[in-house]
Image (spheres, grey):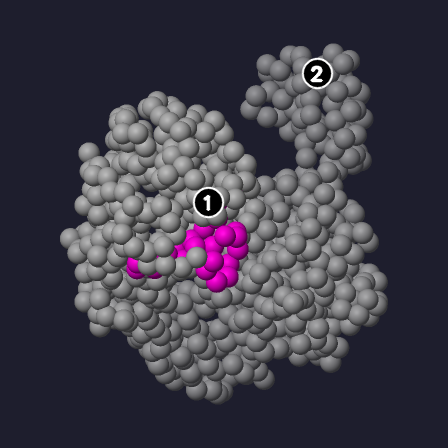
Amino acid sequence: MAILLILLLLCLTLGGLPSASAQEPSSADLGDATPVETEVDLQRTQWLVVTPPETAGLRAGTTATRRVETATGGRQVDRLPDGSIVVELDHTLTLEEMAGVADGLVEAGLAVAAEPDPVTTIARVPNDPLWQFQWGQIETAMPSAWDVTTGAGRAPVVGVLDTGVTATSEIAGRVLPGFNAQTGGADTADGNGHGTLSATLIAARGDNGAGFSGQCWDCRILPVKVLSDTGTGTMSQLASGLRWAVDNGAELVNISAGGTAGSTVLRDAVLYARANGVTVVAAAGNDGDTTVLYPAAYPEVLSVAAAASGGVRYAWSTFGPQVDVAAPGCNVAQDNTEEFRLYYCGTSSATPFVSGLLALAYDDDPSLTPEQLRARAMDTAEPLSWVASGLVSAPGIVPGGAEFNPDGPGGGGGEPDPLPGVEPDELTAVTLTGTAGDLSTSLTWSATSGGSGSGYRYTLHRSTGADCDDTSPRIPNAATTFTDRSFADAGLTHGRTYRYCVYASDDAGTTSERSNVVTVPAQDTSPPPPPHLRSAAAGDRSVDLQWSAVADPTGPITYRLHRTTASTCSASSPVVWTGTRTSTNDEGLTNGTRYRYCVTATDGAGNRSPTSNARTAEPSRNLGTCAPLTGDWDASGRDGIGWWCDGQVRLRTADGQVIRYAYGRRGDVPIVADWNGDGFDTVSVIRDGTWFLNDRLAGGAASRSFTYGRVTLGDVPIAGAWTGGPRDLPGIVRDREWHLRFQQSGGNADRLFVYGRLTRGDLPLWGDWDASGRDTVGVVRDGRWLLRNELAGGPADLSYVYGRVLAGDAPVTGDWNGDARDTPAIVRDGRWMLRYEHAGGNADETIVFRQP
C-alpha cells in the first residue's frame, strides 16, 4: 500500500499583502528606510601594500618610493605604522592580477614584501520594500553572504519537489521546464501555492526595488510536482521526482514535505542523489515532537527545524539531536497568485531558507560536495540546545563577505519611518483581551482608528518580565496581515507568567500608544501520553519491569507502577513504586502467583496519563538467580541435569558423576547447547544481548561471542538443532514470536513464526520430540505441554498434562533414556521427576539434586 506523504502546512501562510500584479508595494508605501548604496566589486582593487627594502624614515619622494611608483605607474597615498606604503594605481585590476604586480616587485628587488590591498565595504543590503519585515535574513546576517555572491556566477539549479511552481514576478525567467511525477507529464502548474512559496523564498530577485529578497537572487528553479494540489502524494512519486531532478540538472534539491514512514525506493533515490553530488534538504516536521519525517530522517539528508526570533523553537517544530540545523521558520514569500505573504510559516519555510543559502555557497565554490555543504552548515551554526547544531549562519556558510550590522543602515526590523512632509495624526490605542489555554494564550484586540495613513498594522509583544512595552520581544508570526486582530500563542512554559501588549501603526509611520497589558499564567492542562510497558520478567519472588519514557513539555515525568492480581490493571490499582526511572524490580512477591502490572505517568503540572498496556508475570524461585539445566554432559547419548546459580555451575551426568566450575556472573542468563557438534553439551551465558559461547565444561574466557536479541527487554534466549545438523544454533522468543537463526551469529532471523504467548504465562520449551534429529518448539501453559513437530505456528502436535507450574514446578526437557527423543520432566524443590514418554502420569525416574 502506498505511503501517503503529508504536506507540511502547519502554522502556514497567513494573510496577504496586495498582489504584485495589481498593486506592487513601493518604498513610499512602507516608508523610505532603505539606504542608498554604491555597487562595489570586491574582486577588484586599485591599491597595493608594499614594504620597500629600506623602510626606516621612508617618506614620499625617496628613491625606494619613486622606484616602486615608476615600476607600477602609481603613486604613494599612505604610509603605515610598520613603514610599509600604500600605492594607488590609475586603474583597477582583479585581485589575482594585482597579486601578479606585487610578486613582480618582490622578484625585481623593489620590495621585501607586497600584496594587493582589497576593497571592503558595508554588507550589501537590498532595497526591496519588504526587506524590513525579513527578520530571519537579518538575524542570520544574509547581507554578508550577498556581499560574496547572489548566485550570479553559476546561477545554481535548485530542484523544488512540491506542489509545483508558478513563475511569479519574483522568479520570472528563472523557472526551468519541469516534471510532474504524479502524471508523468511536464505540467508543473501550482494549484496549491505551497511550492511557489518555497521557490520564491529560495530565489526571489533581490535588490530590485520591488517585493522582497529571496536567498539566492540569481538561482534557477527546477520544478518537480510530487504533490497534488491538495498537498498529498506517495513516497514512490517523491522518489521518482528526486531521481528526475538529479538526472535533469538539479545541483541542490528542496523538499518541504514528508511522511511518517520511509520506503526502500525513497531511500535508494536519496542515495542516488548523494552519489551524483546533489545535496538534499528536507523539512523535519511540524508535530512539535522528536519524530523526524522522511526523507529528512535519512542521514544523507540535511534536516531542518523552525526557529523563531532569537533562536527560540517554534512550539510546532520537530526538535531533538536527530535534527541537523534550525532556520527561521516564518518568512516573507510570494504565492501562486502573485500575493506576498507575511508570513509563510513552518519547517516548510525554514527548509527553502537553508536550500537557498546553500545554493549561494555552491555558487561561490562549485567544488563543495554534499558532505562538505552539510558539514559547513552544521559546523558554523550558532549553537542551539534543541537541535544537533544550531541556527544556520550566512557568514559561516558563505564566508568572506563584509560584516553585517543589523543595527546599522538598512538593518531592517522595526517600523518604517514616517513619510516626509506628513504630520501624523494620533492613533487610538487598542484594547487587548487574553484567555489562557493549554500552555497557550488566545489573544484578540480591538481595531484602531485615526492616523494619517490608509492602512493599519499591529505588532504583538510578549514579555516574561514585570511589564510589556515596545522593547519587549515581538512575536514575529503574529499579526501577519493588515487586518489580523487575533493570535493563538502556543508552546508556553508551565508555571511561567506572560505579559502581552499590542501597538497599532499606519502606513504613514504613526504608532499608537501601548494597549492595556494582559497577564496570563501559563498552565499545562493536557495529560502526557501513556507509557508503553515493554516487559515484565519474572524471577524468584520478584519481577523486573521496563517501560518507555514519556516526552512532555512540563517535566519532570513521575511514573507510578500499579500491581494487581485481578483480571485488569488500571490507575485505581494499588501503586507499588513511584519514581522518575523507566525500570524497577518489584520484590517480596509470592512465587506461583500471577501478577498484572500497568504504568501511569504524571507531568510537572500534575496531569496524569492514561494507563499503559498491561503485562502479567508469575514469580518462581526456579526463575530467579538459580536456573535448572539439562544436557548431555559426557556425550553418552543420555541427558544429565544441573544448576547454574549466579555463575556457579553444578552438573550431574546421566551416570551420577558431578562436575563443578564457574562461568558467568550474577544477572547473566545461562543457555545449554552443543555449539561445535562434538556431542558434548556445554553451558554458556547471555549478557543482555551478547552471547558468550563456551565449548568446554570449564570456566575461562568465552570461545566466541555475538549479539542477538535483548534479554533486558524481555527476550528469552533458546538454542537447538533447528536445521537438523550436529551444531546447535541460537534463537530468541519475544512474547509470541520465535526468532531462529541458522548461523552462530547475529543478524535477522532465518525463521520467524508465532506460537504461544509469554505475556499470558506460557513458558517456552524446545527439543527433539519425535527423534527426527531436528529440534522444534513448545510451550507449557500451567501444567499442559503443547508441543509442535514443525518450526511453525499452528495447533499442537502433542498435548498432555504433567506437573503444575502455578504450584512452583519448573518444566524442563531431555533425552533421559537414550532413545533420541526429548521428553518432559519437572523440578520441584530439588527433586527432578523424569518422564520417558510424552504423556501425563507418574515419574519414570526421580533424582534428588538440589541447588548449590
Residue that carries the numbered disc 2 in the rendered image: 111
Name the spot of residue 227 as percent of width and height, x first: 70, 69
Q: Which residue is drawn at 15% across and 53% down?
A: 588
Say which quarter of the image contains residue 839: bottom left
Instruction: In the rendered view, tell whether residue 805 sits above or below residue 115.
Output: below
Q: Which residue is drawn at 33% across and 24% down?
A: 699
**Residue 768, disc:** 1
Task: Confirm whether residue 314 shows in the render.
Answer: no
Say which quarter of the image contains residue 343: bottom right
Tell me the SS state at disc 2.
Answer: loop
On whether residue 849 falls in the magenta region, the answer is: no
Answer with mark 1 or mark 2, whichever residue precedes in sequence.
2
Quarter of the image for the N terminus: give it.
bottom right
What is the span of residues highlighted in magenta in the rendered image? 774-797
Q: Which of 505 and 786 is in front in this view?
A: 786
Instruction: In the rendered view, tell whether residue 8 sits above or below residue 642.
Output: below
Name the spot of residue 668 as percent of width and height, x first: 32, 38
Q: Which residue lies furthest to the left in this view?
A: 588
Name the spot of residue 701 as percent of width and height, x first: 38, 23
Q: Which residue is drawn at 75% across and 20% down?
A: 103
Q: Which residue is drawn at 19% across and 51% down?
A: 541
